[in-house]
Amino acid sequence: MAGAAAAAAAVASGISIRPVAAPKISRAPRSRSAVRAAVSIGEKAYTVQKSEEIFNAAKELMPGGVNSPVRAFKSVGGQPIVFDSVKGSHMWDVDGNEYIDYVGSWGPAIIGHADDEVNAALIETLKKGTSFGAPCALENVLAQMVISAVPSIEMVRFVNSGTEACMGALRLVRAFTGREKILKFEGCYHGHADSFLVKAGSGVATLGLPDSPGVPKGATVGTLTAPYNDVEAVKKLFEDNKGEIAAVFLEPVVGNAGFIPPQPAFLNALREVTKQDGALLVFDEVMTGFRLAYGGAQEYFGITPDVTTLGKIIGGGLPVGAYGGRKEIMEMVAPAGPMYQAGTLSGNPLAMTAGIHTLKRLMEPGTYEYLDKVTGELVQGILDAGAKTGHEMCGGHIRGMFGFFFAGGPVHNFDDAKKSDTAKFGRFHRGMLEEGVYLAPSQFEAGFTSLAHTTLDIEKTVEAAEKVLRRI
């Protein structure tokens, strides 16, 4: 079965299963006879025939046909899109359709996809090898850049994903404090480690899954949860578990339950409560790091945590993650200290190179002002279109991160977010695909802009949104 599915996938994607170079998928327009389940958009026919063929084959090869659940379009319906190439703020699928992209590979593509300078640097690094499994000088360069940028980080450990970064940070805070309990917030997602899969966001929220099967009770017995933005609930948990909580973990701006910013006093209150109890404050800045400001959300809000996790942007589109904090805390990590954590590909030269050149671009003057401008125009345009067409909507943005809900709002936590009309969002998402706009395939995911997005991209997106909102 697997062999047949592999062959089907190869045929559907136009890739030979013999050891020869794969032909590039043509973007030439298809004949009308080849268009199946097509939607007419002006003079252009929108079809996802090749995506459907490849995805059907993929379902025989990979669970659900994907390697990350939200990609399966379960919450929005319709055919998942199989992509062929990306450049700047645009993406092209295997059927030749072009989209303005607001997913950005879920955050890393802040300077735009396939940036020429980053690619050129990667090619030069590639000539020297892909991975050494040993120290390389590029690790020092990126580490120094991260330490110089992020207020809380005096020492950093590179890993290969945001999940791995949060796993390392979790073990670290327990080792440093000698305590086992942690506090996280409902709808916040910190990767798929067992201890975090309690009232999680991201794909868990998207698919409407309960706390995941396969997670033993012992792994989550020390995980406490509270509603995001609820200071009193946090204080009550600390009172009931005095001296037992190792750390508070949170996304300083929630991106995995939709875009939910903190209330003005929330982060300050967390800083005070943790200090008073001897617990650590951990900012999961896998999404917000280098996106809300060069120093992340902690620079933007002026709140310095004890430990920070990073990912996405610091790898410039390659697999990467990191956790860092005060030197006295990080010196618990092996081989400097007794807390063990390791990784075969951690600090590999390709990821370090992409990260270095991405961060160099973000250091240029006007970067975050531009992100704020284009993202603000996008969100306001969509909300205005919703008001014109009679849809109840709310939303917001900070620099290059945004979101909106089909609900009156305000949205301050995951329970508020769940009041959104997800069926309507699904119809809106499918309509925007037909209009050439790629949004995150879930109401419960934030969106991202980049330095490559132009005023024309924003105008086209807002026009498309109004058009779709009128017909749904």
Image (cartoon, helix red, strand yellow):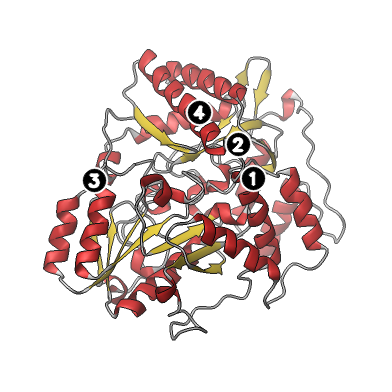
Is residue 378 left or right of 276 when viewed as pictured? right
x 13%, y 60%: residue: 236
The relative height of residue 398 versus residue 150 in the rendered view (above or below) is: above
Question: Is residue 288 in view from this perspective?
Answer: no
What's the CA distance linking mark 4 and mark 1?
Answer: 18 Å
| Residue position marked by numbered label 2 in the rendering | 451
Q: Amino acid at mark 3?
A: Ala
Residue nearer the viewer, 114 or 147: 147
**Mark 3 closeness class: few <14, some 14–19, many ≥20 residues within 10 Å:** few
The quarter of the picture where the N terminus appears is bottom right
What's the CA distance linking mark 4 and mark 2?
Answer: 11 Å
- For marks 2 and 3, the one nearer the N-term is 3
| Residue position marked by numbered label 1 in the rendering | 361
What's the CA distance linking mark 1 and mark 3?
Answer: 33 Å
x 52%, y 33%: residue: 369
**Quarter location, residue 61:** bottom right
* Residues at discs 1 and 3 in contact (Cβ within 8 Å): no
Numbered badge on residue 265: 3
* Residues at discs 1 and 2 in contact (Cβ within 8 Å): yes
Is residue 414 left or right of 283 when viewed as pictured? left
- For marks 4 and 1, the one nearer the N-term is 1
Question: Is residue 456 in view from this perspective?
Answer: yes
**Mark 1 closeness class: few <14, some 14–19, many ≥20 residues within 10 Å:** some
Q: Nearer the viewer, mark 2 or mark 3?
A: 3
Helix, strand or loop at mark 2: loop
Locate residue 418, reporting x and y percent. Answer: 29, 41
Q: Amino acid at mark 1?
A: Arg
**Quarter location, residue 455:** top right
Residue nearer the viewer, 453 or 8: 453
Helix, strand or loop at mark 4: helix
What's the CA distance linking mark 1 and mark 2?
Answer: 10 Å
What's the CA distance linking mark 2 and mark 3?
Answer: 31 Å
